[in-house]
Amino acid sequence: MQRMQRAAIGLMLCALTLAAAAQQPIVYPAGGQSAQKQNTDTAECQLWAKQTTGVDPVAIAQQGGNKPAAPPQQGGMLRGAAGGAALGAMGGAIGGDAGKGAAIGAVVGTAAGGLRQRRKNEAAAGQQQANNQQASQQMATFSRAVAACMTGRGYTVQ
């Protein structure tokens, strides 16, 4: 189970990296600029874009969006079963059959604990998706700034 979670996290980080690379503008030296001049202009425009927008693509890439996805938590069903069994045993003891009460409590507790755990995991996944979307928007803003700068320096940018 943990291997699958790690693989999913790795795939998500790869997708973010590819998405960031896909947002990079394509630049053509329309004014006959040399490759060295284009590299210098690109570096200067990236620095300007970082200062202007406040977006640091290196920091975003290192954070894997904003934060790496936390693996889904587990154990909710077990805790629910234990709590339900204890509660059921107490209720069953009052009625005269603690074992039967514990069994019923364990079943109900397992279901309730699993439901609580699933809701927590869904909320965490939703937050991760929002973080990824925010990182994508920041990278798009940065790329537009780089494109504007390079256009101003005589390049054709797509």
Image (spheres, rainbow, N blue to C red):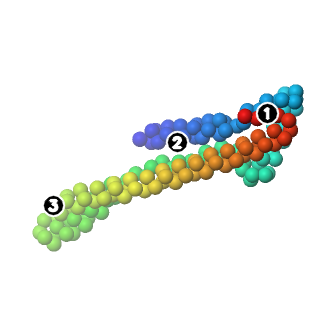
Q: Quadrant of the N terminus?
A: top left
User: Dot 3 corresponds to which residue?
Assistant: 100
Q: Residue type at mark 1?
A: Thr
Q: Residue furthest bottom?
A: 94
Name the front one of labels 3 and 2.
2
The three-letter code of the residue at mark 3 reads Lys
Spatial distance from mark 3 to mark 1, Cα to Cα?
77 Å
* Secondary structure at numbered mark 1: strand
Dot 1 crowding, Cα within 10 Å, few <14, some 14–19, many 20+: some
Density class for disc 2 (Cα within 10 Å; few <14, some 14-19, many ≥20) is some
> Which tag, 3 or 1, sits closer to the chain's start?
3
Q: Label 1 belongs to which residue?
A: 156
Residue at 79% over, 30% down: 28
Circles 3, 1 touching at the beta carbon (< 8 Å): no
Looking at the picture, tell me which residue is in the foreground, 50 or 116: 50
Could you say which disc has been placed on residue 148 in the image? none
Q: Position of residue 79 (x, y in %)?
A: 34, 58
Residue name at image x 47 percent, y 42 percent: 5
